[in-house]
Amino acid sequence: MDMSSGWSIYIIVLVAAHIVGYLWLLFTSSRMQSDEHKDGDTTGHVWDDDLKEYNNPLPKWWLYLFILTIVFSIVYLTLYPGMGNYKGTLNWTSFSSWEDENKDVMAKRAELFSTFINKPVTEMVKDTKAMEIGERLFANHCSTCHGSDAQGAVGFPNLTDNDWLYGGDPDTIIQSITAGRNGIMPPWGAALGDEGVKQVAAYVKSFTDKSQNAELAAEGQKKFAMFCSSCHGADAKGNYMFGAPNLTDNTWLHSYDSGIVETAIMQGLSGKMPAHGELLDKDSIKVLGAYVYSLSND
């Protein structure tokens, strides 16, 4: 985008004034010829009683280098943009340069991808080069949340096991990367009350912790069937359609701590995985999806 004519003129005048100023400085400083001065001539300035400044001309190599610098600047500003809105005789822009370089990169990338991109994901995971690319894509786009080892953190799923919220088949993984996911568990505190929350929490934890209070768990089972089974299923094994987790195993996205479980039931939970469909092209997403699939299907 071009700048305003006022700014363009200002920059042209400023640059031209600098070049003229350098020429004047060069001319005035080179008038003193080496045969017109005597050794020991000074400028007349004295510091600290005996510190004097010699008045010697520029060395020839320095003078010629100065001239070369000015000539270079004039040639450069003729060929390339630098004088306001003037485009230069080569009509060069940083964007066009990037486009040319990007075309070369994309051509090499297409050649590399052609060796594996048409394979199904289950076969692509056996391609070393594809997995190396997928690993780098994961490091750039996914590791911030899921960790460099893909084992997740509180609120961010572990991708190295076989416990999936929305399903772990290749197509579902690719869909998750492309469109993202929005998960929400509604709060049940108002409907259940404090005691009901404790009961449901005891029931949920009783699947893997037999030390839970049996009476609380029994009451919790009734309330679970009423309020929770529509998403988590009557058997509490979850539902890929809603992204509802399996509550009968030892994998807990938001912690197994009783207080955390009760808080989750009372206040609800929400989670969002951003869509990457606009950040990555389809081929990159497929390679990334294959890498994620490989983490739990070695």
Image (cartoon, grey):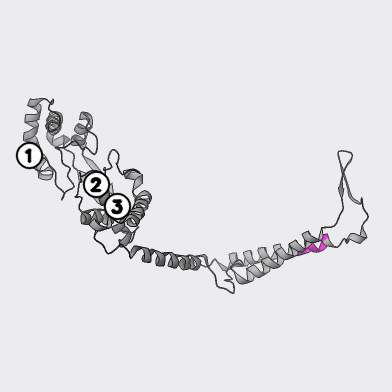
Amino acid on which disc 1 is placed = Met
Q: Residue at x 29, y 52 (%)?
A: 291
Q: Is residue 76 depicted above or below 132 in this figure?
A: below
Left or right of residue 81, residue 268 in this image: left
Quadrant of residue 259 within the rendered picture: top left
The first of marks 3 and 2 along the sequence is 3
| Residue 132 part of the magenta-drawn span | no
Q: Which residue is drawn at 28% across and 58% down?
A: 286
Q: Is mark 3 on a helix, strand or loop?
A: helix
Magenta region, residue range: 22-29
Quadrant of residue 35 within the rendered picture: bottom right
Q: How far across and how far down the image is residue 163, in percent?
A: 20, 43
Q: How far across and how far down the image is residue 22, in percent?
A: 74, 62
Q: Considering depth in this image, is 111 or 276 the residue closer to the camera?
A: 111
Q: How far apart are marks 3 and 1 (CA)?
A: 40 Å
Q: Considering depth in this image, is 187 or 181 the residue closer to the camera?
A: 181
Amino acid on which disc 2 is placed = Ser
| Residue 28 part of the magenta-drawn span | yes
Q: Distance between the residues labelled 3 and 2?
A: 9 Å
Q: How crowded is mark 3: few (under 14 residues within 10 Å), some or many (20 or more)?
A: many
The first of marks 3 and 1 along the sequence is 1
Q: Is mark 1 on a helix, strand or loop?
A: helix
Q: How far apart are marks 1 and 2 (CA)?
A: 34 Å
**Front position among marks 1 and 2:** 2
Q: How far across and how far down the image is residue 182, in percent?
A: 24, 49
Q: Name the residue under label 1.
A: 226
Circles 1 and 2, Cβ within 8 Å, touching? The answer is no
Q: Mark 2 points at which residue?
A: 296
Q: Which residue lies furthest to the bottom in this view?
A: 89
The first of marks 1 and 2 along the sequence is 1
Q: Mark 3 points at which residue?
A: 291
Amino acid on which disc 3 is placed = Tyr
